[in-house]
Structure formats: structure tokens, C-alpha cells
Amino acid sequence: MSTPKKKIKIFVLVLLLFFSFLIYKAVESSLVYYLTVTEALEEKSQSQLKRLRVSGIVEKGSIKKNLDGSIAFNITDFNKTIHVEYKGEIPDIFKDEIEAVVEGKLVNKTFFANKLFAKCPTKYEDEPLSTNKVNLVK
Amino acid sequence: MLETIVVILITLTSLSYLFYPFVQSKSQVKQVDWDN
Amino acid sequence: MRMNLFQPIRSTLLNSIGETLLFISFLTGLAGLASFFLGALKKDDVLIEVGERSIVTIFFLLTSGTFLLIYLLATKDYSNAYVAKNVSNDLPFIYSIASLWAGQEGSLLLWAWILSIYSLILKYSKPYKTLLCSTQSISLFILTFFVFLIVFVDSPFEVLKNVPLNGRGLNPILQNFYMAIHPLTLYVGYIALTIPFAFALGSIISKDKTDNWVIRSKKWTYFSWIFLSSGLLLGSRWAYLELGWGGYWAWDPVENVALMPWLALTAFLHSSMAQETRSLLRRWNICLIFLAFFLSIFGTFITRSGLISSVHSFAQSSIGPYFMVFIIFIVLFSLFMYQKNKKIISSKEDILSLLSKENFLIFNNIFFLVITLTVFLGTVFPIISEAITGEKILVGPTFYDLVNFPNVLLLMSLMSVAPIIPWKDAKLIPLLKYISKPILASAVLTVLFSFVFASLKVLLVLFLSFFVTIIILQDLFIDFRMHTSRGLRIHEILDKKSRRYCAFLIHFGIILLVVGITLSSVYGTKSDLILSKGESSVISKYRIVLVDTYRKESESKSILGAKLILSDQGKDFSLYPEQNIYKYEGNRSINKETEVAIYNTLRKDYYIILIDELEDGRFNFKIYINPWVSLLWIGSLISIFGGIIMIIRRKD
């Protein structure tokens, strides 16, 4: 019998259309642009209006703790630098010269972050091992 | 020297176990049910 | 110290033996594959036997290799590069062993070893037909690929010419019970998907017209589900307890790739019932198990190739290109075989009615797939957007919540009715009669709860939760009444219907999980708080006092802690959040550790993080109050428990 099959196929099609619409709306409302420091500061990227994620290296010595619990620091891509203000939990790895990702809004060259991530140091990188070595005698 | 011996041992053991069915008689080998 | 004259000789020997074991495994794999292929072509029993023996041989070789690496880790033999990278002198013994899966080479060896165990078990399953041969050869092929990686691309037995006195050590964030067990649990689950996949593809290759592959894969799929579920639970629990941001799931790519195979597998577990009972949904089931397997391999590839950056990113690693080729090959081959043999695979009967269990199972598949697709889309969105627009765009957590919530509601609706709807052709009126009382009862309960919870989201979830639960109770009651009237005792009834009741138990656990997630996300609160010693503050209806702060020194770390007392409606809870600084840094870049203070009760979790001591001597805290989060953990445990009973009770 093809009629039940047809009914099922129509039902499924309607469902899929509904979900496609839902996905479209969901994407629209949750977009976050991922930029480098330089890109974020570019005038043409209109970054003032959007929710942004910016990654960069924490500038050495720039981390300041404020009395209201918030922190301020600069992130840089060694081309341009952004000043960041953030309040919230601080990742354990967070310190000078690590790679940080901030999410929030850029307002007049200051980045107001509501999320702060620090990149986990990679496990598979070729880091030089301890310099206390002993020569293997064969 | 020890290294070479161990390597040869491992290789020989594995290969002999692996190819043993070739020296077995047909009836000793497990029969597959080829009908499907 | 340990250095003596024989040390260098022994170390090189052990590493060489390791290399040899792996290399011979690879050659054996190739020989076995050739043997299976020729044996199938010529229908030669001897060749098939050789193929099977290759699996046995590889098992023994890899077992030796794995234990050898464990030995090197346990003895902290830094002549081995892998040991030097992952172990340090101060690392507790148990984490030295756990570092077997901390690094890439070790985890690849572990993967191959576990797969060889599964392949060996496969060899002894009955009956001994063509299906088993094709299944074993596919399993062997995948096994040989992994052996290839550890022999030629990234060996765990690489030797260091200059042996360091101390290793680099394990990231402190991973020196934690949950984090040690969680990857292993997931691996055991992922790798187990290889066998059902091999059965499915094997059934196509051997032109098997029966449903045997589904029946023979059942225990493997249950087993995999239990471990994947446990792995996800452990990961979330770890994130909640250790990462210190009050949450348990961040929709991070690494998390998503662990979730997707679970979703496809859960869909398969349901859908395969139609094939077992009525030989229907045959194409669906092949596709679902293919999808589950592809997603598990894809997940491994993603987390090890640096393709998607996440906050848990791994470096661009050497195995990326090989994995990509492997995935592309296996996907194309599987799809090709599927297309070629579509006629044999397809169900012989048609679906007769919209209102039937088999049709509801189709809807179940669709909803699960939409969730899987959504998670997939969200995960690869940055890659696609960058490829198309040049801009890297992400989707935030709200993306997933927005699409998944309606899907979860739809799934819960199915969860209520599908178990009680008959196969083939159900009549609408009797069905409506059956569910009328549960609907009414659920509606009444929901209205009552609306005085406590005003959120529409919560009420929808509650209504469906009541509906599912009450139908289960109704079904149990009717069942028991009918069976006891026939003279059966309780344990006999349980015995007879164990699979159904286990399913009910699992469903109930999932219901608790969904309720826990919904309530805690809708009513959870997050507050900032700065206090000086002795000061108290009021946040919503809670009073919090910073009673004391303390500094302590232990052998490995310096501790800064705070004692807070939180008062909630007359009850007082003491919490001790801490910030630790590890003394030994080695070459690790993390030496700071946040210890979250959590007090959990059934109704609420009180969760405090000590962020910092401020310059003026006051202390900076973040406080999360998460209502009913406990249901999440309890529900997960109940579901997993139900799964375990199910696999024990399954008779074939």
C-alpha cells in the first residue's frame, strides 16, 4: 500500500522543513564571530555590532586585578593590541604570554568580555624535555 | 645479541602458529558453513 | 639513582622488542587480510583458518606490547620517548599507568589492543558461517590500520638517545580519578562499535539475506552503549567538579564528537527492534550503525588532528592525513557496497500504517538524527563558514538548546506512547482510551506544579515526564495483574519481561536527567560576591558569611582557602573553596589549581569558587546555586544500571 508510505513521507517532509527553519533561526541568534586582534580592530569588519570571540596572546605584565573583582589585561597578535575587561572565573592556566580567547563585545577599542578561555597547552607539541640529560653509553 | 635472539623467537613463533593450518590435513581444519 | 651499567642495555632491548612486536603484528595483519580475501574467493577453509589465526597472533603480540609499555611507564623508564613525555618523577604510580592513554602513541596502541581483544572474542562466536568470516576480515582490516599507525607513523617505543633524569609529566588537571577513567571508558565504548559495523558491512559483503547481523551485534551494541553513556557521564561530572564554571556541558567540539556516536547508537538500539521482530527498517539499521561507527572514527580524527580548535585543542598531529584517507576510503567503500546490494538489504514488507510501532520507530530515528545533525553542524560550522565566507563563525550554546529542546520534547512524546503501541496497525480509539487516564493525570499534576514552577519550558517537560512515568506504571500494573492472575510469581514475571522493564528503567532515568537539566538551567543562579573576613552578604534568599580564610603548605602545593557558611531557609552549609599552587612545575605550564567547593543535596547544589584574593585583602567569589542538578546524575546512573541489567539478562 502506497498511501501510508506517502503519508509518512509528507509528514517527514513537513518535519524536516520545520527543523530546517528552526536551525536557521538558531544559527542566526547565536552567531559568534571568531577574529584575530587585528581583524577585530579593523573598521570595515563592523565588529562593534556583533558578538565576538577574539584570540590573542596575553601581553606580559598587562594583567591587573581590580578591587571589584574584575580583571583587565591586553591581548595582542603582535600586530595590534586590544584592552580587555572581564569579570568572572579565571582559568587556571591564565597568566602572561599564554593564548587566551575572550568572548563579548568590542566598544570603542575596549573589549568587554563575559567569557574567558585559555588554551590548554598542547600535549603533542615538540617541547624540549628537561635539560638535565645524561648521555646514554652503548 | 639478546635483541636479535628475542626478535627471531617472536617472529618464528608467530609465523609457525599462523601458517600451521597449511600443514594440517583438511579434516583437522575448522569447517566453514559456506551456505548463506 | 637508578642508573647502573645494565640500565641502558635493558632499555634499548625493551624498546626494540616493543617495536618488533608491533611490526610483526602489522605483517601478520597483512597476511591475514590476504588470507581471508583469497579464502573467501576460493571458499578455502584452510585460508580462513589462517586469517583467524592472524587475529589471535596479533592479540598476543599487542598484549605483550601493551604490557611492555605499561612496564616502562610503571618503572618510569625515560629512555622511552613516550614515557619521558607523559610521566615525571613526582607522578603518583597510578597516574603513570593511566598515562598509557594520555598521549597519542599510547592511546593508539591501547585502541589497537582493545580492538584485538574484541576481534578475538568475535572469533569464538557461533555459528561459524560466511557472515562471521566477512565480519572478522573487516575487523582485521581496521585493526591493521591502527597497527600501521603505531608502526610507521607514531611509535610508542621510540628511543631517546639522551635519557633525561626527569620526564615532562602529566598535566595536573588530568591527575584526577574521573579524568583518568573517562577516556578509557569512552575508548572501550567507541571501539566496541567496530564489531557491529563489521557485522553490518560483513552481512552486505557476504550477501546475507537474513537479519542475523542485527541479532549477533546486539550484545556488542548494548556493551558499547553502556560504556559510551558512562564515559559521557564521567566527563560531565569531571567538568562540573573540576573545571569550575558551574556547568557540566559546554557544547565544545571534543564533547560533541563523544555525544554524536551515542546518539546514532541509541537510535540504532531502538530501530533494530523493528528488524528483530518484523524484519523491517533494514536499510535504516545499516545506515544507523554505519553512521555510529563513522562518527566514532571521525571523533577520534577530529580530536587528534587540530582541525577544529576548541578550548581543549590538541596540536596538529602527524596522524591526521592518514586518518582522513582511512575515513574517506571506508566511507566510500561502505556506501558503494550499500548501493550495490540495496535490493538484498531492503525490507521485504512495507510499513502498513502511520499508527504503528515501526512507524514511531522511524520518527524516533528522524528526531535522533536531527539532533545528531544539529550537533554536527554546530561542531563543523567554523570550518564551513571559513571555507565559504573566509570568516570564522561559531555558534554558541544557545544554538544547540534552541534546536534540541523541541526535539527532546518530541522524543519524550514518543517515549511515552511508542512502547505501548502495537506493531503493524494500531487502532486509534483503543489507543486513545489507553492513554486518556495518564494524560488527564499528567495534566492535573502539571497544573499543580505550575504554582511552583511558572516557566513554560519546565511545565512542558514536566507534563511529558509525568506522562511517560504514568504510562509505565499503568503498563506495569496491568501486566502484573494479568500475570499474577495466571499464577506467575513476581520474580517469574520479572524474568519474562526483563527486557521491557529494563527499557522502562532506562527511559525513567533519561526522564530524570532531562528534568534535572531543564530545572537547573532555567532556575540556576550565578552571582559574584566580594567579602572580607567576617563579612556577610545576602544573595536572593541566601545569606553567606566568609567566616575565615587560611593558608596551608603541603608537600606538593601551597593552599589558599576560605571557609564560608551559606544559610538557606534555616539550614547552614559549610563550604571550603580553595586555590592551590603546585610547587613542582617541571615543564608543565599549569601550576595553579582551583578547587571548587560543592555542597550537594537532592534539591540544590551550592557551588562556590574562590577566584582570588584582592589587593585590599577582600576575597572574590563566584556562587552558583543549581537546583535539582542531582536528578541529572541520579537519572544517568539509573539508565546505565538499566542497560547493565539488560545486557546481563540477554540470552543469546
Image (cartoon, rainbow, N blue to C red):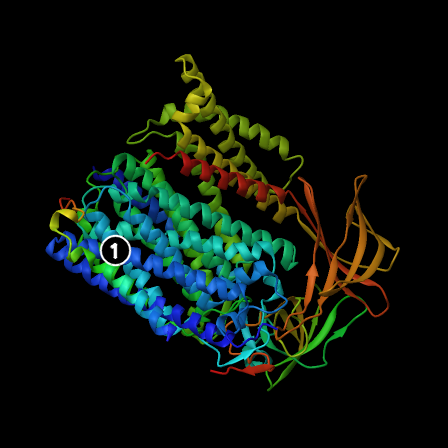
Comparing C624 with C177, the one in front is: C177
Q: Is residue C157 left or right of residue C354?
A: right
- Could you tell me which quadrant the N terminus of chain C lies in? bottom right
The answer to whether residue A50 is seen in the rendering is no
- Residue C157: where, in percent of width, then height? 43, 71
Q: Is residue C83 left or right of residue C207?
A: right
Which residue lies most toward the bottom here?
Answer: A79
- Could you tell me which quadrant the C terminus of chain C lies in? top left
Comparing C4 with A78, the one in front is: C4
Q: In which quadrant of the rendered view does residue C55 lie?
A: bottom left
Residue at horizontal 62 percent and vertical 54 percent from the top: C240
The residue carrying mark 1 is C53
The answer to whether residue C376 is seen in the rendering is yes
- Residue C180: where, in percent of width, then height? 55, 57
Residue at horizontal 41 percent and vertical 36 percent from the top: C648
- Residue C624: where, in percent of width, then height? 70, 52
Q: Is residue C630 left or right of residue B14?
A: right
In this rendering, is residue C458 above or below C292? Answer: above
- Residue C117: where, in percent of width, then height? 36, 53
